[in-house]
Amino acid sequence: MTIDAPDGASVSSIALACDKACRGVLASAPGDSVALSAFTLAPGEAAAPPLKPLAWLTGSASRDVSPALAGRSGASLFFADDAVSGSGRVRWMTIAWP
């Protein structure tokens, strides 16, 4: 199975948290920006999962956001968000998975 980024963008990184199913966050670079998208994978699923937009980041596409999901449920997402000005920060969000 291949998971493609929206609009043919380049994928820069991915994070997975697996229990009975896997939940993931994909970082992609459409143009000169970075976007985070969420997806779920069920065991034995052959089709690529649909991506759901989570956030657009303030940094440019050359920045590494390194998303990381905490815990098996994947409810907490941590990622870097480096502003164009160079003032980087680590951000955190809670994801309510269906």
Image: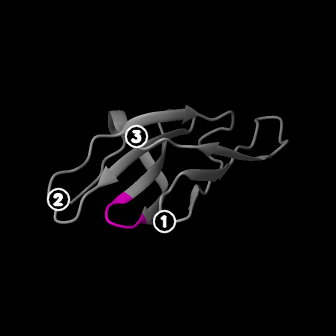
Residue depicted at 40% across the width and 55% down the height = 23
How far apart marks 2 and 3 lie (CA) works out to: 23 Å
Reading the chain from its start, which is encountered first: label 2 or label 3?
Answer: 3
Answer few, some or many: residues within 10 Å of disc 3's Cα (few below 14, many 20 plus, some between 14 and 19).
some
Residue 87: x percent and y percent? 85, 42
Q: Which mark is residue 12?
A: none
Residue range highlighted in magenta: 18-22
Contact, mark 2 vs mark 1 (Cβ under 8 Å): no
Taking 6 as reference, is 25 above or below it? below
Q: Which sits in the foreground, 44 or 2?
A: 44
Residue 74: x percent and y percent? 50, 56
**Residue 32 visible at all:** no
Residue depicted at 33% across the width and 38% down the height = 8
Answer few, some or many: residues within 10 Å of disc 2's Cα (few below 14, many 20 plus, some between 14 and 19).
few
* Label 2 SS: loop
Does the segment drawn in magenta span residue 80?
A: no
Reading the chain from its start, which is encountered first: label 1 or label 3?
Answer: 3
How far apart marks 1 and 3 lie (CA) works out to: 28 Å
How far apart marks 2 and 1 lie (CA) works out to: 19 Å
Which residue was labeled with disc 1? 72
Contact, mark 2 vs mark 3 (Cβ under 8 Å): no
Which residue was labeled with disc 3? 9
Give the residue type that dot 2 points to. Answer: Glu
Residue depicted at 79% across the width and 46% down the height = 89
Give the residue type that dot 3 points to. Answer: Ala
Give the residue type that dot 1 points to. Answer: Arg
Contact, mark 1 vs mark 3 (Cβ under 8 Å): no
Instruction: Give the number of the mark in front: 2 or 1.
Output: 1
Which residue was labeled with disc 2? 45
Reading the chain from its start, which is encountered first: label 2 or label 1?
Answer: 2
Q: Is residue 55 left or right of residue 3?
A: right
